[in-house]
Amino acid sequence: MGQAAHRPSHPGAPERLLPASHGEKLPARKFVPDLPDVRDNGGVPPQHHAQRKTTLQIISSAEAAGHGRVAEMNRQVAANLDSIITALEADDDTKEASASAS
């Protein structure tokens, strides 16, 4: 009960409600900006290739310094990036094949 006494009497941002068209109360939503779609231009985003290159450099440096755990964790990151890049390239190849068949 001590905590309840310290709470402000006005509703906070998450507790504010807006009336819905059918009388139900819905939480207020804040403006969320549109995020650019990295797939707009097709192809693999250059950030993926840059991140892979950086990750391979981290692996080399970690191995040279004897930091096996860091190298091991980054090998998994590199494998995940390889999977992402391969999937994106395959998706692009499929789209190109569909477009040329039309």
Image: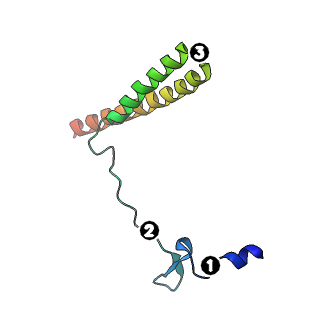
Q: CA distance from mark 2 to mark 3?
A: 48 Å
Mark closer to the chain start, 1 or 3: 1
Residue furthest to the right in view is 1
* CB within 8 Å, label 2 to label 3: no
- The label nearer to you, 2 versus 3, is 3
Residue on which disc 1 sits: 8
Within the image, what quadrant is residue 33 found in?
A: bottom left
User: In the image, residue 37 lies at what x, y percent?
Assistant: 33, 48
Of the residues shown, which amino acid type is indicated by label 2? Lys
Q: CA distance from mark 1 to mark 3?
A: 55 Å
User: In the image, residue 27 lies at what x, y percent?
Assistant: 52, 74
Question: Looking at this view, is 65 or 75 the one in front?
Answer: 65
In the displayed structure, 95 sits above or below 66; it is below
What residue appears at the point 73 percent right and 73 percent down from the top-left corner? 3
The local secondary structure at tag 3 comes to loop
Apparent side of residue 100 relative to residue 33 in the rendered image (left or right): left
How packed is label 2: few (under 14 Cα within 10 Å), some, or many (20 or more)? few
Residue on which disc 3 sits: 66
